[in-house]
Amino acid sequence: MTNVSIPCSGYSLAADWYENNNSDKVILALFGFSSSKARNSELLLALGEKSGMNILAIDLSGHGDSPLILDETRPGQHVLEVIEVFDWFKAQHPQAKITVLGTSYGGYLAAYLTRYRNFDKLVLRTPAIYAPSDLYSLQPLIDRGYTSNVYRKDKEMVADHPLFKQASIFSGPTLLVVHEMDEDVPLETTDVYKDMFSAEVYVAPGFKHSMRDASNPPEEVQPYQNAVANWLIQ
C-alpha cells in the first residue's frame, strides 16, 4: 500500500493506493461520515485480494489524514472533492475501468458523482441520504436525528430528492449492499436507491449499519466480501 496526495482546490487530500493484479481495473473508495481509509483497510485488502483490482481509497477533507476540520466542511464541498479526485485519477489513468464504491455518506457522494461523470460500475454500500437543504450546510447544523428518524423513513420525500431528479451521466451497472439490521439507513431509503439505479441487491444478514459493529455475525464476513468481489469481476 502506497500513500498518495491528491491536489484539490488549494489543498491536498490523503489517499491510499492498493496495487493488485488487475492493472486496468480500479476501485475508487469513498467512506462514511467521520470514517477514514484506515478504518476500512480490512475490507479494502479483502476486496483487492479477491477481485485483483487496484484500489484508491480517499480521505475527504476533515476525515482521516486529510486537512481541514470536519465541522467546518459541507456535503457540497465533499461532492466537489469527489469530482476533483475522479478527474485527477482519470487524467493519470485514462484507460482505467473505474468502479466507484461508496459507503454510507460516501454512497451519497458517489450517487452525486453519477450525475456528473460516467465510469464502469457503481457499488453503493448502505448509502445515506440527506435533506436537500443540507447540501451546503455546515456539518454541525445538519439535524442528524431528523435525517435518520424522519427523512430517511419517508420514501416519497427521499424519491423527490433533487439528486434523483437530475439526469444521470453514469450508464453502468450498480450493486446495492443492504445491511439487514441497519437502523441508520432504513429500507425506505435503500428501496429508492434500488429503484433509481435499477440496482442488483445483496442483503448482508445480521449486519448493523457499521461494518465494524461488534454484534455483526463474524461467520457472514467472508460471504459478504465474496459477494461484492464476485460482482466486481463478473
Image (tube, rainbow, N blue to C red):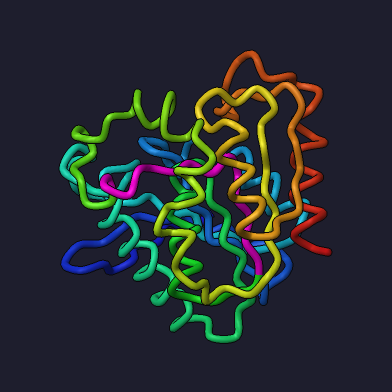
In magenta, the rendered stretch is 121-134
Residue under the image location 43 percent in, 24 percent down: 149
Give left or right: position of 132 versus 18.
Answer: left
Give left or right: position of 85 versus 230.
Answer: left
Q: Is residue 133 magenta?
A: yes
Q: Is residue 102 magenta?
A: no
Number of callouts in the render?
0
Residue under the image location 70 percent in, 59 percent down: 198
Q: Position of residue 101 (x, y in %)?
A: 58, 55
Quarter occupied by the C terminus: bottom right
Give above or below for 177 relative to 91.
above
Q: Where is residue 20 in the image (x, y as percent from the top left)?
A: 68, 62
Q: Quadrant of residue 186?
A: top right
Q: In which quarter of the image is residue 98?
A: bottom right
Q: Is residue 13 or residue 132 the one in the foreground? A: 132
Q: Where is residue 217 in the image (x, y as percent from the top left)?
A: 74, 19
Q: Is residue 196 or residue 208 the one in the foreground? A: 196
Q: Is residue 136 or residue 36 the one in the foreground? A: 136
